[in-house]
Amino acid sequence: MTRLSVNINKIATLRNSRGGNNPDLIQVAKDCERFGAQGITVHPRPDERHIRYNDVFELKKIVTTEFNIEGNCQEQKFIDLVLANKPEQVTLVPDVLGQITSNHGWDTIINQHYLQDMIAVFKQAGIRVSIFVDPIAKMVEAAATTGTDRIELYTEAYAHHYNQGRELAIAPYIQAAEVAQKNGLGINAGHDLDLQNLKYFAENIQGLDEVSIGHALISDALYYGLENTIQMYLKQLAIN
Ligand SMILES: CC(=O)[C@@H](O)[C@H](O)COP(=O)(O)O
Ligand SMILES: NCC(=O)COP(=O)(O)O
């Protein structure tokens, strides 16, 4: 069964826009779990545009499902934050400063030794590690040499091309997932997944452990309400 981890970055975006504590990020995280979310994901960025580093410490106290912290391990502050909070999972994303959002996976060939060292640090702390990768077979193959527990397939290209032809859009992801399974890697996925494209993705990717969804889910909640929206996303995943 594929788990749904709700990314609450955009709740923090709304909260920060007025400088107060409305919406209350901690209460929203509790409610997401009460509504059925099987994980909470956050992506603290160096400019703290949405999730603040202090939010992570407060969330750690209340998340009862799985806590997934995403971010760039090339920032020492991120490494320290993760080790201090020991989430169930850390997802390493190769962002560069100033990106509007995450837009590429690791080059696991060039960064093999760096990733081996970084992943060892988090695994030593008892934290499951996932690394963000593009759906490229050789990158997934090389990911297996880094010691990572899982990969997270970057699904923006799938989402972008879904409406032009979903069979073509998903093909590289099916191949990447097959390589991951062959190499004993767990499979996560995320970025731009939504109510229209999620079901097809989940029913075609064998061994999909988790999807982390934020932007579209929070946007949908403006129309359908948060509880109803989480239930709608869970229904899309109920196929396997
Ligand atoms: C890694 C990834 O694709 C997303 O999880 C990312 O966290 C989205 O970040 P923003 O919410 O800042 O766009
Ligand atoms: N890892 C993907 C994630 O957490 C949320 O991405 P998005 O749904 O906000 O695009």
Image (cartoon, rainbow, N blue to C red):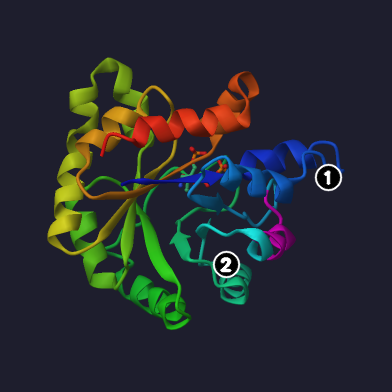
Taking the image as shown, residue 22 lies to the left or right of residue 136, namely right
Question: Helix, strand, or loop for circle 1?
Answer: loop
Give the x, y percent position of residue 201.
28, 33
For the point 72% across and 47% down, the residue is 27
Is the shortest distance between ligand 1 and the CB of mark 1 under 8 Å? Answer: no
Whether residue 98 sits left or right of residue 102 in the image: it is right
> In screen coordinates, is 129 left or right of 74?
left
Magenta: main secondary structure equals helix
**Residue at position x 28%, y 34% from top?**
239
Q: What is the x, y in percent for residue 111?
A: 33, 67
Q: Secondary structure at mark 2?
A: loop
Q: Residues within 10 Å of mark 1 (few under 14, many from 20)?
A: few
* Image coordinates for residue 184, horizontal then vertical, percent: 19, 64
Q: Amino acid at mark 2?
A: Glu
From what the image shows, is residue 69 above or below residue 100?
Answer: below
| Residue in view at x 57 percent, y 70 percent | 82
Q: Is mark 2 within 8 Å of ligand 1?
A: no
Q: Nearer the viewer, residue 16 or 57?
A: 57
* 54 falls in the magenta region: yes
| Amino acid type of the residue tagged 1 in the rendering | Asn
Circles 2 and 1, Cβ within 8 Å, touching? The answer is: no
Task: State which mark lies toward you, 2 or 1.
Answer: 1
Membership of 216 in magenta stretch: no
- Left or right placement of residue 191 versus residue 153 in this view: right
Total marks placed: 2
Q: Position of residue 188 (x, y in %)?
A: 34, 51
Query: Label 2, on which residue?
Result: 75
Q: Residue furthest top?
A: 164
- Residue on which disc 1 sits: 21
Q: Point out the stretch of residues depicted in magenta.
A: 51-59
Residue at x 71%, y 58% (from the top left corner): 55
